Amino acid sequence: MVLFNRLQTRIFAFFVLVIIAVLTLSFWLSYQSNQRLEQQYVANQLEVASLVFESQYDNRNYYLAAFASTAAKDFALKDIFIDGDNRSFLVALNNHRGRINASLAMAVSGDGKVIGQLVASQDELGQEVVALGSEQHAPFRYKLDTEFDQISPFYLLDNKLYQIKFSPLTSGGNSVIGWVGFGFLIGDSLANSLQKLTGLNSGFMLLEKEVITPVGHSGFPLEHHETQIVTQYIVADQADSDFILWKQFLGHVDDQSLHAYMYKSRSDLLASIESQWLQQVAVLLLMLPVSLLLAFWISGSITRPIKQLIEQARFIAKGNYHSNVSVDSSVELQQLASEFTSMQQAIVAREKAIEHQAFHDPLTNLANRNQLQRVCEPWLIEGSTMAICLINIRRMTEVNVTLGHAVGDEVIKEVAKRLCHINPNALACRLSGDEFVLAFKEYEHASFEVFLTMLQAKIGQDYHYQDILLHLQFTAGVSFYQPGMDIVTLLRQADTALQHAKMNKRDYQVYDANIDKNSVERFQLINELKVAIEQNQLVLYYQPKLNLAKQKITHVEALVRWNHPARGIIPPDTFIPIAEKTMQMDALTRWVITEAMAQYHRWQVQGIDMCIAVNISAENLKDEQFCYWVIDTLAQHNVPVSAMTLEITEDAVVSDPELAVKQLTLLRQNGLTLSIDDYGTGYSSLAQLKQLPVDELKIDKSFVQKLLQTNADQIIVQSTLQLAHNLGLKVVAEGIEDKETLQWLTERHCEMGQGFYLSRPLPELQFNDWLSQSAYV
């Protein structure tokens, strides 16, 4: 017991246990590795055997087929075959056989008679001997026709099996006059070749009702127990664990099935691996005493300084107080302890710094996205009435570009400082360059607008940086927690509200599902729109325009719809903005115009004379080639320019008046009718309207739908009619939804009317039916 209490003994015992554990683990890992190696080696050996056999077998098949085809095309051989000189034909056939060292050569006449059968073998001296086969002049055992490839690739002749391929002999007109074939012997020679390549005993067997007939085998003939093992494996698929076995079914020969096999004793195959395993075990056993000696030496060296201290303590105990106490490694041990303490303190400090950096913004020292998620997740679990306010500081890009990033950083710091004083219960975070978040654990929806007003007052205070006065402004998006939501969803909703506020030039927006409707669907449509245009998934609907003076439908407006294969009909309000934002508007407009021209001709065939109006966008007018394309396409499709009206909105003209006037003037000079669509809702001036080379104005439906109920609308429409007529322009009123409105417009000499009272937009066939039954024909 006292001996075990010694430190050296304990250290030595510990090393012994570690050594035994390590050696045991090494032994076990080595054993497992050896087992896996054996399994992998066996699997690799079988895979190699399979690949080698398939390569040899396929190569022989290919070589025989190729050579038979080549021989069948030999004109000299054909001439001798046709002349009927049997001796000369056999000589020629043998010459061909000799070129590939075939064991069998055969020729069959068109009536199925064997006219040539040459069998090659070796005599006792190893010399090749060629003789006529036993079936010479006999009927061929198989039925031959033009599908000669269906003949079995194996041929049993005089108890010898051949791998054979035939090819037809043809004469003028490609008529078959006979067949010629060559074969290699399947026997001991092939088996020996496979054994050399794979290292496995190889052979072939014919099976008929569990009766095995050996065809060939490598090396010595199979012993009785080997024959039983191979037979059970081929017949019943029963493998012997002491052998490595492989088999392959090759086909049928007469009524027998032909099988190839390879095998080898597992112990013979794995002898080298077993030898390596024994060497590893010997090395492990040899390491045990060496390791124990090394452990004993190490344990002594570790305790040696302590023993020195003990000896010196005993020496002092005897009264030797003037001696200096020294230990060989005492200073190192003290320094080591001190260094460990210093290291521990440094690690703690670094971990705190790293954690702070991971969860705080380095510029403002506010919490970042990680801290936001870490703090808010427990709030969500508690089910608190949480709110997220996402704040975007306006014009930060302008500040950075104009005043420099240093000033921009100071502005960001000032905003962060102000946010920290907004509400002590709020978690202030900085997400990115000019985006901040205020997260509230508890907040009522009704009182949040008051908070946003206060926030606007706090943030909006002027900021003086050196001699520069900056007025800080922000846009905010707010989202409130709903059961089942996570922080990612809250942030996404707040961002959606923020983007909506930016788009509508508002200071803030509280998230509403209506502003986020179909956002995922819209994203998918962005990717699918290009395919829709290319694959002709679009369709045109037509809304009639009534000539109010003639009370006759003379015009239609072509309105594009997307016939989505999965979502059905998609209205233009959904995908037109997508086309404008993704630079696909030009392709879309060109498709609409081309389809409208095709529709014009279809109506002409039916005796319908109709002018078609097509909408074009500002993006089209920015392309100087677009107008030339319209003019050229009208000429190519043989459509008169009077049959096409192009409608353009006021806003498209306002965006670039000079370019718009230039493009529209070119179209007008080439005879096209131009119309200002949705007149009264845009920002065009009378001065711009005066300069536009247009033919008509379309009064927006918002002024027409409640025309008889609103005096202001009547005044606006009446004034527009007078203005247009004074400028020499025609007027189209859209949004007519009742007979009284139609009558009111007719009395005031409005040229054209359009609206649901007449008809909704209809696809081609429905429009044709409507037109045939309409009173305005």
Image (cartoon, rainbow, N blue to C red):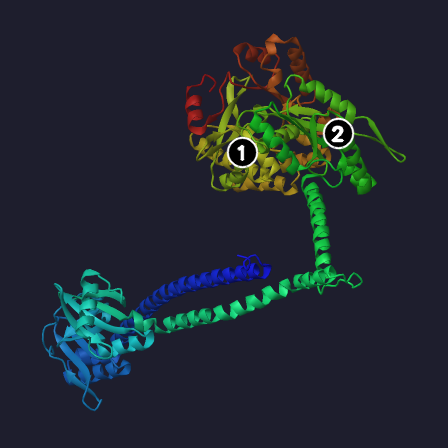
Furthest residue toward bottom: 125
Q: Position of residue 75 (x, y in %)?
A: 26, 78
Q: Is residue 291 left or right of residue 655?
A: left
Q: Nearer the viewer, residue 252 or 269?
A: 269
**How many numbered discs, if any?**
2
Q: Position of residue 728 (x, y in %)?
A: 67, 23
Secondary structure under the numbered disc 1 in the rendered image: helix
Q: Position of residue 483 (x, y in %)?
A: 54, 25
Q: Residues within 10 Å of mark 2 (few under 14, many from 20)?
A: some
Residue 693 visible (yes or no): no
- Mark sitting on residue 609: none
Question: In whole angstroms, how far apart are the C-alphas of marks 2 and 1?
Answer: 35 Å
- Residue type (three-letter) at the residue carrying disc 2: Cys
Compared to residue 97, the image places residue 368 above or below, namely above
The residue tagged 2 is 420
Q: Nearer the viewer, residue 303 or 444?
A: 303
Do the residues bearing badges 2 and 1 touch, measured as CB atoms within 8 Å?
A: no
Q: Position of residue 1 (x, y in %)?
A: 52, 57
Q: Which picture quadrant has residue 578?
A: top right
Furthest residue toward front: 318
Q: Residues within 10 Å of mark 1 (few under 14, many from 20)?
A: few
The residue tagged 1 is 520
Compared to residue 500, the image places residue 297 above or below, namely below
Q: Which picture quadrant has residue 437?
A: top right
Q: Which picture quadrant has residue 76?
A: bottom left
- Residue type (three-letter) at the residue carrying disc 1: Val
Q: Is residue 431 left or right of residue 216?
A: right
Q: Nearer the viewer, residue 616 or 332?
A: 332
Secondary structure under the numbered disc 2 in the rendered image: helix
Which one is in front in this view, the residue at disc 2 or the one at disc 1?
2
Q: Upstream in the sequence, badge 2 or badge 1?
A: 2
